[in-house]
Amino acid sequence: MQMIDTRPTRRDWIATARTLSEALPFLQRYDGKVVVIKFGGHAMGDPKLMEHFARDVTLMKQCNVQPVIVHGGGPQIGKLLDRLGLGTEFVGGLRVTDEETVKVVEMVLAGAINKEIVTAINQAGGRAIGLCGKDDRLIVAEKLLRMVKDPESNIEKALDIGFVGKPVAVNPEVLQSFMATDFIPVVAPVGVGREGETFNINGDTAAGAVAAAMKAKRLLLLTDVEGVKNAEGEVLTDLSRAEVERLTADGVISGGMIPKTETALEAINGGVDAAVILDGRAPHAVLLELFTDHGAGTLIKA
């Protein structure tokens, strides 16, 4: 049986060197700049993709890009609630969160998931530190009321969905203190209320608020689709605010993509240069977006 030599050849090394050389202008563009990354979806549950993500983030920090990770964890929360026999109800895509549920949310997000990501980055040679929005009042939140229309009267009313919050203030000093160090902050989207309450915050929303407070160069929203698509199903690589609004009004942007594009626009309003919606399942998606001409996903800018 003939053995195939899989060792890298001189041509492979030259290709690697060329890739590094071509990345130089992008490395200069992001030198010292903050990039907020929302990490979630299936990539978070795939050990290989988690490993790739951890290596990529560690490489970014090594190149003096300043990554801030904000993660989700909806599926993991749902699984534990099922195991505990606690029912789950959703209203408008948001989990109804009572007092018992919010304890589980905090345990899963600020505990298991946060430390799993921190460990993966540390294993890749980085220095990650886990935080949640309650640490030093990093993310102050207030109750989010979901508006629903009564089918009989056609009148909108506010529906209380429990301890689901929206960010009203982000303390950037907490994260800025890590920028001059080797540490990579990993933030769980659990906020604190004015009276010390615990709030469950949507991961995309939290990432957008953090990016705006940090005046980030980029907000990267890693999801389970390739990006925003047109009516023919083709990925749109560049969109302006006006184009996002038109596609939403026409129903092309719909469902779960709406809150992501809304988060992107709100972040840009808050001072972020641009936001990108990209497929976190693609290996090295973050590096492709930041350090190559090709990019990845959909870039949304003002």
Image (cartoon, grey):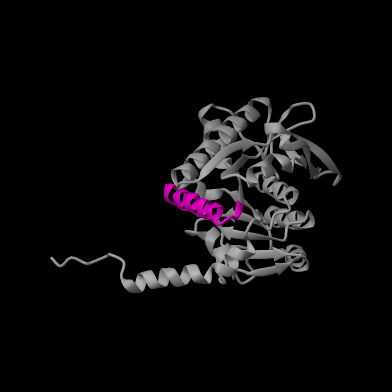
Q: Is residue 42 above or below residue 111?
A: below
Q: Position of residue 106 (x, y in %)?
A: 62, 31
Q: Quadrant of residue 111?
A: top right
Q: Position of residue 27 (x, y in %)?
A: 58, 63
Rendered residue at 84%/40% (across/down): 157
Rendered residue at 62%/41% (across/down): 187
- Depth check: give the residue in front, 128 or 149: 128
**54 is within the stretch colored magenta:** yes
- Depth check: give the residue in front, 120 or 224: 120
Q: Which residues are magenta?
A: 47-66
Q: Is residue 199 above or below residue 243?
A: above
Residue projecting furthest to the left:
1
Q: Position of residue 96 (x, y in %)?
A: 68, 35
**198 is within the stretch colored magenta:** no
Rendered residue at 64%/25% (across/down): 100
Q: Is residue 236 above or below residue 208?
A: below
Residue projecting furthest to the front:
180
Q: Is residue 109 visible?
A: yes
Horizontally, residue 194 falls left or right of residue 180, namely: right
